[in-house]
Amino acid sequence: MAVLGGDGTASYAASGLIRSSSSLPLAVFPAGRGNDWVRTLRTESIERTIGSIRSGRIAAMDAGICFIESNETSRDDYVFINSAGIGLDALVLAKSIRIRRKISVGKLGYLAALLSSLVEMPSWEGTLTMDEQKVFTGKYLSITSGVCPFVGGGMMLSPSSVPDDGKLDTAVVSPISRTNLIRSMPMIYRGTILSNPSVSSWSGNEFRFEARGKLVLELDGEAISGIPDNAVVILKSLPASIQVVVGSEY
């Protein structure tokens, strides 16, 4: 199966294959804004994808499933193949979508949304449990649970994520100053953010996040709307759940 598009298109296609237990390999011709999933696959261009299809390079990759629970709605579930973001990255994504609907600015929309969020420097609060063990509670700036390491057009908020180890890697960024965050931006792109004292990371099969108050969430670069306050997000690994076409350097 081959699709042309970005991370959202790839996610929808992969979700259908996973839910139907199909062994059909998925090839993605990148044509989106972020193209973060194909960065991991090492098929960052249409030419590379064509070469990989011709060579028959196939690999089994993990995915994840997200359950959202609350007292106000029934339990919803979403399959994701790249990452789940709670907090700042989800807020920035939602803002960038609103900006692009008003003005045609391409990738600059994400940068504008990020800068406006830095002015506000928001924070949220909740409790994170990994495999039934509480690992974090309190205020946070961002929580990223990754199947793969890249998000937001090349940023690495969960750089230890490995797409075929059967686990999710989840990184929590505690509230930090605006100056500290700006200074940390090069670390995010180099994949060294875990060395920042404000960042903690864990690797596990299942993460449960209980929000206190408002919760903003994105999955594979798609904003999830209509989440009630005090919702619970459960993220589970789906090991080796999809066959994908990968590049020679994967």
Image (tube, rainbow, N blue to C red):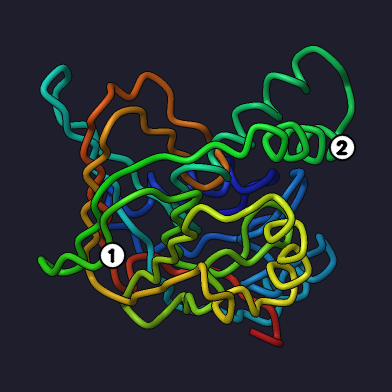
- Inspect the image, locate mark 1, and give the three-letter code of the amino acid beneath it: Leu
The tag on residue 111 is: none
Mark 2–mark 1 Cα distance, whole angstroms, equals 34 Å
Residue at (42, 72) in percent of width and height: 200
| Disc nearer the start of the sequence (2/1) | 2
**Horizontally, is 68 left or right of 4 in the view?**
left
Query: Furthest residue to the bottom?
Result: 249
**Horizontally, is 92 left or right of 76 in the view?**
right
Image coordinates for residue 190, horizontal then vertical, percent: 74, 76
Q: Quadrant of residue 68?
A: top left
Residue at (47, 58) in percent of width and height: 174
- Tell me the element at label 2: helix
- Residue nearest the observer in this picture, 187 or 248: 187
Image height of 7 relative to 195, above or below: above
Q: Quadrant of residue 112?
A: top right
Residue at (57, 64) in percent of width and height: 157
The residue that label 2 is drawn on is 108
